[in-house]
């Protein structure tokens, strides 16, 4: 995801997107993060670690943007409702764990 203030790519630090260029810090809604994680290639059986999840999620959010992640989720939900629901449960749980400030 890019900085809303200066447009530079932001880093995830302590569960927040932080811009090292201008200092903008924003907390991202876990649902948005889960949608981005949903769109990554990560699988529950990969047992990704916290930083793996954070990198994949923020890369995907930067690359696709929030709207595209939501659109892909909606598309998947239409095509495979059950598998999509299962993956979203995993994604929500995983982002809450991976982006929890205490784990950084
Ligand atoms: Zn900035």
Image: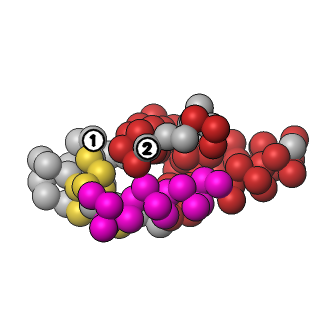
Nearest the eye: 6 or 37: 37
Q: Is residue 88 magenta?
A: no
Q: Which residues are magenta?
A: 90-104
Nearest the eye: 74 or 94: 94
Question: Residue at point 86% right, 50% down?
Answer: 81
Q: Position of residue 79 (x, y in %)?
A: 87, 41
The residue carrying mark 2 is 49
Please say whether residue 7 is visible from this viewpoint: no
Classify 67 as above or below 15.
Answer: above
Please say whether residue 46 is visible from this viewpoint: yes
Question: Along the horizontal axis of the image, is 66 left or right of 89?
Answer: left
Label 2: how many Cα within 10 Å (few below 14, some 14–19, many 20+):
few
Question: Along the horizontal axis of the image, is 33 left or right of 55?
Answer: right
Question: Along the horizontal axis of the image, is 89 left or right of 66?
Answer: right
Question: Residue at point 58% right, 61% down?
Answer: 93
Q: Secondary structure at mark 2?
A: loop
Question: Along the horizontal axis of the image, is 2 left or right of 94?
Answer: left
To which quarter of the image does residue 72 belong? Answer: top right
Q: Position of residue 41 (x, y in %)?
A: 59, 32
Q: Position of residue 89 (x, y in %)?
A: 68, 59
Q: Quadrant of the C terminus?
A: bottom left
Is the magenta region chiefly helix, strand or loop? helix
The residue carrying mark 1 is 9
**Discs 2, 1 touching: Cβ within 8 Å:** no
The yes-or-no answer for disc 2 within 8 Å of ligand 1 is: no
Classify 88 as above or below 55.
Answer: below
Q: Position of residue 25 (x, y in %)?
A: 23, 63
Q: Nearer the viewer, mark 2 or mark 1?
A: 2
Question: Residue at point 23% right, 42% down?
Answer: 8
Question: Residue at point 41% right, 39% down?
Answer: 52
């Amino acid at each position: 995801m890019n900085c809303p203030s200066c447009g530079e790519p932001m880093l995830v630090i302590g569960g927040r997107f932080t811009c090292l260029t201008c200092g903008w810090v924003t907390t991202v809604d876990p649902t948005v993060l889960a949608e981005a994680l949903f769109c990554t290639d990560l699988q529950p059986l990969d047992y990704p670690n916290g930083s793996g999840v954070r990198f994949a999620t923020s890369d995907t959010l930067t690359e696709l943007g929030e709207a595209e992640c939501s659109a892909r989720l909606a598309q998947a939900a239409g095509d495979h409702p059950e598998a999509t629901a299962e993956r979203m449960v995993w994604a929500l749980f995983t982002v809450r764990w991976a982006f929890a400030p205490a784990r950084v």
